[in-house]
Amino acid sequence: MRIAINGMGRIGRLLFRRIWESGTHEIVAVNDIMPPDNLAYLLKYDSVYGTFTSNVKWQDNLLSIDGKKVIACSQADPSTLPWKEHDVDVVLECSGKFLDRAGAGKHLGAGARKVLLSTTGREDVTLKVYGFNQNGSLSDVDILSPGGCMTNCSTHIIYLLNSFGIESAMINILHSFTSRQSLVDTAHNQYRRGRAASESI
């Protein structure tokens, strides 16, 4: 399977590493608007997961991973990406920006055969949560969401409790901080989001 990854942030880079290390699929292209030399550096070095064992270089507008070339694009609009030219089977949509059919569908318009979101999509995107509703044919599904972290954490518990009957429920989720939060208190249009990430739950 020929894979392209759109969005080389935290999730995109970790998916890249796991897919590359497994050797089961071929990553042919990545797309992110960050400077490509920075992308190569962040792919190689990770503060939590350590150093990527593969040799990562940026040269001639390509990522070189253990001597194999991966196309590196830097486009904000997915409809301009060269998925048809590179015969992409599946785009892993990891940017967090294209969550509905219109947005994620731009990858299909660019020539990809399927799109798999890395999080929960909007109502017009098929949602299949492993261990809950993953059964059934997906042959006619071209854009798929596996749900996000909160969906996957809560769905199975709610499903089990529902067999006894649920009158009401409340779920409180503590989420680790992300790159969208500041390390120190700062001005933000949502006041609580401006608080230091490591001190704010």
Image: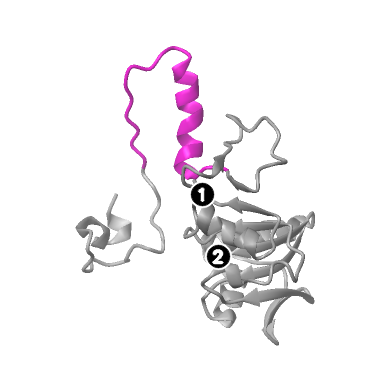
The stretch in magenta equals 146-173
Q: Position of residue 133 (x, y in %)?
A: 59, 30
In which quadrant of the rendered view does residue 129 lie? top right
197 sits left or right of 35 in the view: left
In which quadrant of the rendered view does residue 130 lie? top right
Whether residue 176 is visible to the viewer of this picture, yes or no, is yes
Query: For mark 1, does the 10 Å Cα neighbourhood hold few (<14), some (14 to 19), or many (20 or more) residues?
Result: many
Q: Earlier in the sequence, mark 1 or mark 2?
A: 2
Residue at x-position 48% and y-position 36% = 153
Of residues 119 and 198, the one drawn nearer to the viewer in this rendering: 119
Label 1 secondary element: loop
Of residues 25 and 135, the one drawn nearer to the viewer in this rendering: 135
| Residue 124 against residue 59 in the figure, above or below | above
In the picture of the structure, the residue carrying the numbered disc 2 is: 7
Asked if residue 19 lies in the magenta stretch, the reply is: no
| Amino acid at pointer 2 | Gly
Residue at x-position 73% and y-position 62% = 88
In which quadrant will I find the N terminus? bottom right
Q: Cα distance, mark 1 to mark 2?
A: 12 Å
Residue at x-position 75% and y-position 69% = 86
Residue found at the very far top of the displayed protein: 164
Whether residue 49 is visible to the viewer of this picture, yes or no, is no
